[in-house]
């Protein structure tokens, strides 16, 4: 385990040092950073470091904070670029989806595709539904066009119907009964 940790830290230091060296040596890269890179990229980069560490070190659980941190950096980049800070009223629902993406990646790294789809996919789907509901509602309050136009209440109705029907759609696991039979011998 100590060898793996040393390897991971070494690779990360090489990547970070290589990035800073490239910025110093290649003027177009420095110009690009001055023009396009903003503070949210630091947050995205930190999250990507967690993801790289999860992949390289085999500590798959680091994928979850990696996707959360990178995702929040992406939200901040959008809000900073478009000056749409009131979107935070509903953008927080995406963090649930970032957790789902992290769970998906974690289970993929562990080699468990079925669990990745069931646990990660379900969390991502819930996040998307919440994002559409809250986004449409708050965008209407902020006098912006709702995502679904005038039909956003239909999403609430469908979500409510899904919550009513979902318990009846779950597969029931068959119950296995083990019976022990005693043979009584007559003497």
Image (tube, grey):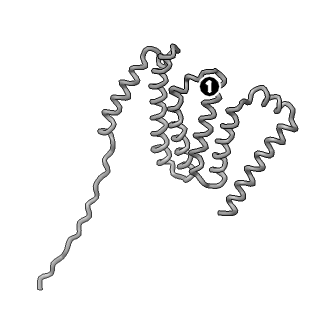
Q: Where's residue 46, x and y in %?
A: 67, 42
Instruction: State which quarter of the image contains the C terminus.
Output: bottom left
The residue tagged 1 is: 79
Quick one: which residue is furthest to the left in this view? 187
Front residue (pair 99, 105): 99
Q: Residue at x 64, y 21 (%)?
A: 82
Question: Which of the 4 quarters of the picture holds residue 79?
Answer: top right
In the displayed structure image, the side of residue 42 where residue 158 appears, left or right? left
Q: Residue at x 12, y 82 (%)?
A: 186
Q: Residue at x 31, y 39 (%)?
A: 167
Q: Eyeballing the image, is 32 above or below 186? A: above
Q: Where's residue 18, x and y in %?
A: 80, 44
Front residue (pair 149, 112): 149
SS class, disc 1: helix
Q: Residue at x 59, y 23 (%)?
A: 85
Q: Where's residue 156, x and y in %?
A: 38, 24
Quick one: which residue is furthest to the bottom in this view? 187
Instruction: State which quarter of the image contains the N terminus.
Output: bottom right
Q: Where's residue 41, x and y in %?
A: 69, 34
In the displayed structure image, the side of residue 102 where residue 125 appears, left or right? left
């Amino acid at each position: 385990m100590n060898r793996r940790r040393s390897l991971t830290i070494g690779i990360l230091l090489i990547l970070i040092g290589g990035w800073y060296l490239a910025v110093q040596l290649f003027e177009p890269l420095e110009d690009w950073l001055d023009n396009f890179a903003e503070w949210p990229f630091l947050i995205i980069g930190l999250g990507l470091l967690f993801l790289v560490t999860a992949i390289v070190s085999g500590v798959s659980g680091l994928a979850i904070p990696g996707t959360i941190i990178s995702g929040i950096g992406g939200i901040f980049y959008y809000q900073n670029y478009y000056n749409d800070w009131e979107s935070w009223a509903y953008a927080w629902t995406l963090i649930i989806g970032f957790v789902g993406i992290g769970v998906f990646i974690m289970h993929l790294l562990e080699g468990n595709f079925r669990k990745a789809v069931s646990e990660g996919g379900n969390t991502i789907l819930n996040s998307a539904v919440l994002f559409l509901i809250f986004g449409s509602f708050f965008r209407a309050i902020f006098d912006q066009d709702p995502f679904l136009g005038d039909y956003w209440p239909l999403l609430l109705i469908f979500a409510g119907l899904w919550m009513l029907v979902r318990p009846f759609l779950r597969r029931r696991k068959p119950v296995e009964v083990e019976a022990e039979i005693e043979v009584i011998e007559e003497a």
